[in-house]
Image: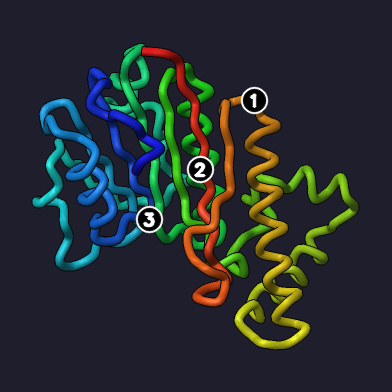
Amino acid sequence: MQALGNANTYSRATVIEYCAGKGRLTEEVCKRCFLQKDRVDAILIDRTRSRGNADGRIPANCTRITADIRDIVIEDLGSVRETSGSCSGLVCAIGKHCCGCAADLALSSISSISASGASQVYCAFALCCHHLCTWETITCRQMLEDEGISDFDFLCMRKLATQARAPTTQGKAGRLVKRALNELRAFSLRSSGIFEDVQLVEYCSSEISPENQLLIARKWVEV
């Protein structure tokens, strides 16, 4: 949240939460970072609808979309298009539990917004469940292929990732697989030239969880 800076300097903002679940992350972001509800739109995306949603508590104009990320042309949504078209508008994409390929689909989605001409874009995704990544959707596939890694090799990497919590040699290998895929995702995003700043940060100790990395990317112009 600190990376957003003074979010209230933007003329309008659209917060997009991928794999939103109940929407509580969006609720907290909107409450802590944005003061004027009439200038903020919130879009919650998930394949299923959860009970006890936070939608009604989110201090923003809230829309929930029940669909697969791959089926949504995110830059064509009205609020996203309006915010992206403003030189002082902010598109903020977040995800606290983007499992496997969902993280790659979300990264591709927000990259399309940034590439379409949006001036201010911020995204933060907690990366997890690497065993659910797919060869078809992984954003760093070209880099893997350049290193001679095949779809079968990738399947073996996914299986190793399931052992990441084990206190064994296989567990260490699994943790290295997770780290390698995250680093390659970040490098792929940097290489695209779409974002000015891409970082991988650890938000908790690996002793608490081997899935402790947050991928942050920003694109901005002075407003």
Q: Which amino acid does label 1 sit on?
A: Gly
Pointer 2 and pointer 3: residues touching (CB < 8 Å)? no
Q: In this view, does 205 lie to the left or right of 151?
A: left
Going 36% across and 13% down the picture, which residue do you hit? Answer: 223
Whether 201 is drawn above or below 43: the answer is below
Q: Which amino acid does label 3 sit on?
A: Cys
Q: Which amino acid does label 2 sit on?
A: Ile
**Which residue is disc 2 drawn over?**
216
Whether 190 is drawn above or below 220: the answer is below
Going 12% across and 30% down the picture, which residue do you hit? Answer: 36
Distance, label 1 to label 3, CA atoms, is 26 Å
**Which residue is disc 3 drawn over?**
19
- Number of the front mark, 1 or 3: 1
**Which residue is disc 1 drawn over?**
193
Distance, label 2 to label 3, CA atoms, is 17 Å
Whether 151 is drawn above or below 118: the answer is below
Q: In this view, does 109 lie to the left or right of 154?
A: left
Going 32% across and 27% down the picture, which residue do you hit? Answer: 80
Sequence order check, earlier mark of 1 and 2? 1
